[in-house]
Amino acid sequence: MPIFKKPPFRGNADKKRDMPEGLWHKCPGCGEVIHELELKKSLRVCPHCNYHFTLSAPASKPPRTPPNPAPIPINNALPSGSPDSN
Ligand SMILES: [Zn+2]
């Protein structure tokens, strides 16, 4: 039984975590890495291969569908049953 436990090797895993998320995008068309500002300037089109990145809906815009209307109350005074069963 060892006295000291060997720490697991993690390589450069800690260095990768220093990179902020969402700043760099890898183009699925050509594999080039493009900065977010460069993508915004080119209207989300890859400057190397003209691949069109997907656009996300702006959060400031309201939804296009109107909100649900108020529920219509069911009139319980109406008689139930078939009109033929007199
Ligand atoms: Zn590309």
Image (tube, helix red, strand yellow):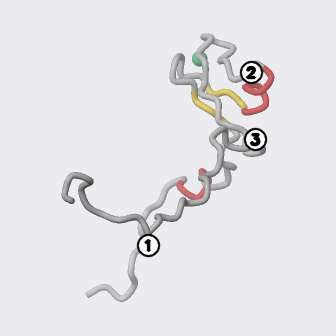
Front-lying residue, 83 or 50: 83
Q: Nearer the viewer, residue 73 or 55?
A: 73
Q: Earlier in the sequence, mark 3 or mark 2?
A: 2
Nearer to us: label 3 or label 2: 3
Q: Quadrant of the N terminus?
A: bottom left
Q: Secondary structure at mark 1?
A: loop
Which of pointers 1 and 3 indicates the residue nearer the eye? 3
61 shown above or below 9: above
Q: Residue furthest left?
A: 85
Residues at discs 2 and 1 in contact (Cβ within 8 Å): no
Residue under the image location 47 percent in, 65 percent down = 75
Residue labelled with disc 1: 7
For label 2, the crowd category at 10 Å Cα-Cα, with few meaning under 14, some 14 to 19 and many 20 or more, is few
Instruction: Give the amino acid type for the residue marked by disc 2 in the picture.
Output: Leu
- Rendered residue at 41%/64% (across/down): 78
Q: Is mark 2 within 8 Å of ligand 1?
A: no
Q: Is residue 9 left or right of residue 26?
A: left
Q: Position of residue 48 (x, y in %)?
A: 64, 12
* Residue ID for mark 3: 61
User: For this view, does 4 lie left or right of residue 2?
Assistant: right
Quickly name the residue at label 2: 43
Work out which quarter of the rendered image holds the C terminus and state it: bottom left
